[in-house]
Amino acid sequence: MTLVSIIVPCYNEQESIPIFYQRVDDILEKFKQQREDLSWEYWFVNDGSSDETLKQMTYLQVGHPDQVHYVNFSRNFGKEAALLAGLKQAQGDYVAVMDADLQDPPELLPTMIETLTTSDYDVVETQRIDRSGEPWLRSKLSQAFYHVINGLSLVKIRPGARDYRLMTRQVVQAVIDLPEVNRFSKGIFSWVGFKAKVLTFDHRDRVAGNTHWSLRQLLAYSLEGIMDYSEVPLSIASWLGGLSFVAAILGMIWIVIRALLFGNPTAGWPSLVTIILMLGGLQLLCLGILGKYVSKIYLETKRRPQYLIKEKR
Ligand code: UDP
Ligand code: MG
């Protein structure tokens, strides 16, 4: 038998869960007619939802006790934590990660399973190629994000890359084995490497509910991603310091020459104040960047678990 585990992080998805289950199960049942060795299990992770999400999971679990499992967190720990919890629980030879809102098309699952079981690929990734359903500002900002992170970091992330993917047990183990507390899945998946095939699809809307990401959260998430996978911001400090040092030397030389040639009339207070402000600002910026990295080190050294499980079934 080939067992496929499907991991679904859920935060306030009471309406999506039953629809999700129905759609995915229909597709896999149909696929099973060609692949008789196929079996599958679900791992729903309730990430501290405040609605009836847990009830929906329990309901499915009672109806299909061998196939449907769930993990219930003690509070909201974020999607990254929910993904990790699911990966750790999954028993499958192949593990899929999917959003509950059906924005990750389950019709791709048969192709993904077929690819991994019949070729030497280790991962099938997905990429959303058209962002038409998204607000203009958001898609521009996310383009900028991919540009920056791919420029600053050795880890490359494809624009529009989704977390939706199917992995072999070996890849899942590699992801779980990374001990870091600050987890940025897009970076981790890219960092572990392995041979990956990419499937593309067009944007689709949520079946129910609303997105949990505000623009501010997305910006914070992008910054985290960049800092987790790049040391370049740290060297900004040295570069800015070096540049202003050179500028100061040039300025001094210019002042001496000017004094020799034209004398020294008392002038230039406004420019002086601007320069002081500018240098002060640069110093604060660099301190801030440094501080962000220090706080990440602080969080890592605490070695706190990424999530707490209240119950599991
Ligand atoms: N999610 C989660 N914890 C959170 C936020 C989101 O588990 O704190 C789940 C959510 O239920 C969904 C997936 O992560 O299954 C993606 O979230 P969402 O659809 O809101 O993101 P978007 O598709 O808008 O980027
Ligand atoms: Mg979504």
Image (cartoon, helix red, strand yellow):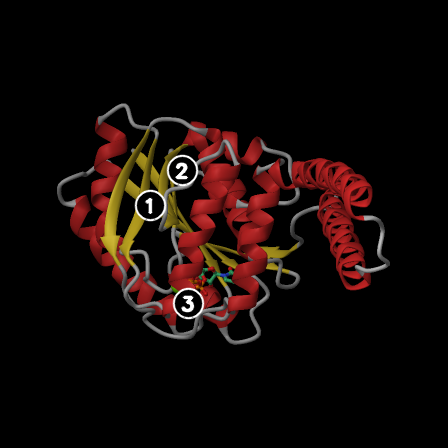
Does residue 193 appear left or right of residue 286 in this picture? left
Q: Earlier in the sequence, mark 3 or mark 1?
A: 1
Q: Amino acid at mark 3?
A: Leu
The one of 35 and 120 positioned closer to us in this rendering: 120
**Which mark identifies residue 40?**
1
Above or below 291: residue 51: below
| Residue shown at the point (32%, 56%) measured from the top left | 104
Q: Mark 2 — residue?
A: 92
Q: Amino acid at mark 1?
A: Trp
Q: Earlier in the sequence, mark 1 or mark 2?
A: 1
In the figure, residue 117 lies in which quadrant? top left
The one of 271 and 308 positioned closer to us in this rendering: 271
The one of 210 and 227 positioned closer to us in this rendering: 227
Asked whether the beta carbons under mark 1 and mark 2 sit within 8 Å of each other, the answer is yes
In the figure, residue 217 lies in which quadrant? bottom right
Q: Mark 3 — residue?
A: 137
